[in-house]
């Protein structure tokens, strides 16, 4: 018999939570050959549709995913598939022209992210263990610093640059868009939250890579600024400490996931405790799945939900972080 300490849990219940759920962070491919995928966008959308999910948001670190989303929506009806743009160094970093193009290409952007692996904060700490010693790419390969760091995004903590102003104005002009901080530093992310308020941008998502390094006080500041906090399962799996080339085509630049020299600090149990303590109203969960060493994104979403069930989160809390809150980002009614 279930008790208050051990509420009813089952695989069937975790699958039921997928009905209406939204994964706001999937990487189903295409991708570079050095980082194979577990699935393609069409197969991923079909699996999500069969599971009863409402929507997927495709992230692509090499290309605007608005064209991919448009194509998937033509052949996989009855589920929403959305795309956007991540301002990585393939676009030269802070590029307003790339953002303007993404707004009108394919299905049109629903998010603008200020970089992933190629923000300055992220790229400067990318590294791996080599012969038992931790090396950073920037220190080990001078050409990495020249080619990547020189183009990587930095968010000024004082006055925004003209390029940043132009991008923020683009986001503010389209209420369907939401701003994603990208893998910037906590201080830079809080500055973006502040600027979003100044420019009248209503929807902001603080990326998981940022939340992982935030103090609780910084999280509260972001929340007070109207932002959601993203928590992703991929940061807490067996693949996190494995060197990969998620972003760089050069094999020598293979790095640990998230640029960390070890495991992330919280784990899924810590994520559940954050949601419980700070409040489910302020969190959105997703998978960040797509790499071939992990299950497909749909199964990853089920596993994340099952873990939160194991940690004792209430049904309504799970619905908020997996369906209601991401639905608000995408203007989808629950």
Image (cartoon, rainbow, N blue to C red):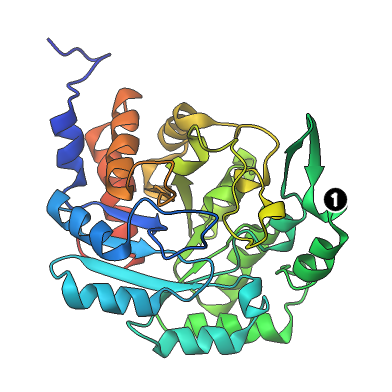
Q: Nearer the viewer, residue 244 or 118?
A: 244
Q: Is residue 72 left or right of residue 228?
A: left
The quadrant of the rendering that contains the C terminus is bottom left
Q: Is residue 323 left or right of residue 65?
A: left
Q: Residues within 10 Å of mark 1 (few under 14, many from 20)?
A: few
The quadrant of the rendering that contains the N terminus is top left
At x 28%, y 68%, the residue is: 81
Is residue 72 in view?
A: yes
Relative vertical location of residue 94 with respect to residue 299 in this rendering, above or below:
below
At x 57%, y 55%, the residue is: 246
Q: Which residue is under mark 1?
A: 140
At x 34%, y 29%, the residue is: 307
Is residue 176 in view?
A: no
Q: Position of residue 131 (x, y in %)?
A: 79, 32
Relative vertical location of residue 26 with respect to residue 156 in this rendering, above or below:
above
Q: Position of residue 242 (x, y in %)?
A: 59, 37
Relative vertical location of residue 275 with respect to residue 59 in this rendering, above or below:
above
Q: Nearer the viewer, residue 129 or 166?
A: 129
Residue at disc 1, secondary structure: helix
Question: Hey, which quadrant is residue 72 in on the image?
Answer: bottom left
Q: Position of residue 133 (x, y in %)?
A: 81, 32
Q: Position of residue 75 (x, y in %)?
A: 17, 74
Q: How many marks?
A: 1
Q: Is residue 41 left or right of residue 275?
A: left
At x 77%, y 37%, the residue is: 130
Q: Nearer the viewer, residue 324 or 151?
A: 151
């Amino acid at each position: 018999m279930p008790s208050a300490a051990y509420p009813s849990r089952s695989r069937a219940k975790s699958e039921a939570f997928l009905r209406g759920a939204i994964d706001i962070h999937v990487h189903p491919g295409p991708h570079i050959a050095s980082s194979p995928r577990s699935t393609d966008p069409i197969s991923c959308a079909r699996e999500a549709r069969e599971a009863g999910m409402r929507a997927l948001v495709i992230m692509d670190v090499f290309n605007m995913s608005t064209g991919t989303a448009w194509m998937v929506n033509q052949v996989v009806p009855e589920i929403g598939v959305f795309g956007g743009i991540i301002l990585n160094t393939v676009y030269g970093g802070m590029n307003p022209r790339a953002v303007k193009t993404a707004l009108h290409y394919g299905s049109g952007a629903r998010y603008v992210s200020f970089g992933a692996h190629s923000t300055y904060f992220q790229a400067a700490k990318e590294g791996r263990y080599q012969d038992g010693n931790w090396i950073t790419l920037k220190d080990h390969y001078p050409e990495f610093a020249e080619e990547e760091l020189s183009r990587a995004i930095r968010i000024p903590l004082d006055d925004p640059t003209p390029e940043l102003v132009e991008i923020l104005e683009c986001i503010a002009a389209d209420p369907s868009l939401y701003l994603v901080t990208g893998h910037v530093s906590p201080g830079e992310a809080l500055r973006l939250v502040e600027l979003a308020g100044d420019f009248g941008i209503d929807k902001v998502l603080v990326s998981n890579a940022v939340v992982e390094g935030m103090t609780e006080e910084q999280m509260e500041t972001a929340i007070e600024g109207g932002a959601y906090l993203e928590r992703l399962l991929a940061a807490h799996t067996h693949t996190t400490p494995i060197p990969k080339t998620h972003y760089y085509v050069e094999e020598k630049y293979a790095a640990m996931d998230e640029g960390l020299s070890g495991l992330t600090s919280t784990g899924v149990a810590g994520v559940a405790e954050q949601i419980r303590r700070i409040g489910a109203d302020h969190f959105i969960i997703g998978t960040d799945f797509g790499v071939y060493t992990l299950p497909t994104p749909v199964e990853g979403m089920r596993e994340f939900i099952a873990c939160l069930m194991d940690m004792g989160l209430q049904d309504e809390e799970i619905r908020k972080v997996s369906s209601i809150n991401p639905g608000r980002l995408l203007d989808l009614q629950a």
